[in-house]
Image (cartoon, rainbow, N blue to C red):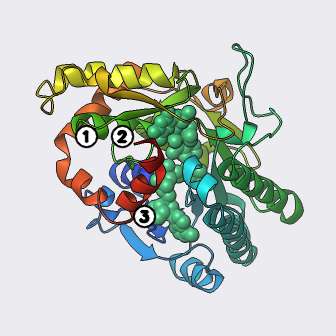
Amino acid sequence: MNILVTGGAGFIGSAVVRHIIQHTSHHVLNVDKLTYAGNLESLASVADHERYQFSQTDICDRVALDQLFKTFQPDLVMHLAAESHVDRSITGSKDFIETNIIGTYQLLEAARFYWNALEESKKATFRFHHISTDEVYGDLEGTDDLFTETTPYAPSSPYSASKASSDHLVRAWHRTYGLPVVLTNCSNNYGPYHFPEKLIPLIILNALAGKALPVYGNGEQIRDWLYVEDHARALYTVVTEAKVGETYNIGGHNEQKNIDVVKSICTLLEELAPNKPSGIEHYQDLITYVKDRPGHDLRYAIDASKIEKDLAWVPLESFETGLRKTVQWYLSNTKWIENVQSGEYKNWLVEQYQADE
Ligand code: NAD
Ligand code: TYD
């Protein structure tokens, strides 16, 4: 099959592209604008593969999208391109509205016109897979509650509101035009090639550099962590096996308080990187409580029983094994890290943290 992946140079998209090229015989066209979060170095292991091609294209550019659909003739579309960082959406929401809402609309329209013209047998097997987040469901207050596929939407941040909007568009394109869609809503991912503005890579790299480890508010917020390769495998399973119109929640059964995540990283670093920067006795001494994120959701947790039951998908990594692999990856991939720690990323960190330093 020909699989068109949007956002394939990002954290999760690159794991999806690597998974498809390395574990299947399908062809991939990676459509990515290469924003600050897009990094072709994350695709170095597949870049020269004959079944892989890349197009630097903005999903808001309908003319370019139409041309790509025409020449690549996709059997499946996996839509991951998005602005994805909650903190950035708070300081500047425009890009989130443009890419996550308008971009998804343009992609849906390009897919719909392409799909309408397909012969009947191809029309029946075509899929548009929209990759979304558990953040559309908002905050869980009760400690035992879990997000299910029928939890009402209640997004809190510009990021989650823009993703919720895009989910609604995708479902409307199915109901109104019959476009064969599937959707997934996943919990927080972590693992290799994660851009170091997000909690886990930021803490690993700050600790190794002897810098403050910023914990928002009291650090009691809870996230449900999933290893990125488990997510990539789930996405491939859904796009190839799920029934049209279905939604699946994807999660790792790994609920952790932020402060505990930060402490676990420090403990792993004590073992794996015992030579600390001068003047640092314990990595944990670097933990610094900073002002809280506005509108910060307290708890996310996923009920993944539907995908486990229908599609026999289960995560292979526990938080313990996945976090160890992740820390080891950041310790041995210094070149990738050096290259992302430049340009726009640096400017962002200065803007974000100067108030607290
Ligand atoms: P990311 O920020 O690492 O990557 C996003 C990619 O999209 C980048 O390569 C970027 O260049 C590209 N992109 C951005 N705007 C574009 C545009 N206008 N046109 C084309 N390409 C564009 O994000 P990620 O963490 O890999 O997330 C991928 C998807 O998964 C997103 O839709 C996100 O909402 C969803 N998701 C993420 C998580 C998580 O924990 N990271 C969890 C659940 C769902
Ligand atoms: P993040 O990785 O930004 O993912 P999301 O906001 O999509 O869940 O943040 C994960 C959690 O960690 C979230 O509750 C915010 C918190 N956090 C910090 O405490 N300090 C930080 O420096 C960052 C980036 C996040």
Earlier residue among tags 1 and 2: 2
Looking at marks 1 and 3 on the same chain, the residue that comes earlier in the sequence is marked by 3
Residue 12 placement (x, y as % from top left): 46, 49
Specify the amino acid type for callout 3. Answer: Tyr
**Mark 3 close to ligand 1, CB under 8 Å:** yes
Q: Are marks 1 and 2 in contact (CB under 8 Å)?
A: yes
Cα distance in 3D space between marks 3 and 2: 16 Å
Local secondary structure at mark 1 = helix
Where is residue 78 shown, x and y percent of the image? 57, 57
- The label number, if any, that marks residue 277 in the structure image: none
Residue nearer the viewer, 14 or 266 = 266
User: Does 338 sit above or below residue 251?
Assistant: below
- Residue at which label 1 appears: 330
Q: Is residue 6 visible?
A: no
Taking 305 as reference, is 117 above or below it?
A: below
Q: Residue at x 49, y 25 (%)?
A: 258
User: Circle 2 sits on which residue?
Assistant: 201
Q: Residue at x 29, y 56 (%)?
A: 341
How packed is label 1: few (under 14 Cα within 10 Å), some, or many (20 or more)? many
Tell me whether circle 1 and circle 3 mark residues in contact (CB < 8 Å): no
Which residue is label 3 attached to?
36
Q: Amino acid at mark 2?
A: Pro
Three-letter residue code for mark 1: Tyr
Secondary structure under tag 2 reads helix
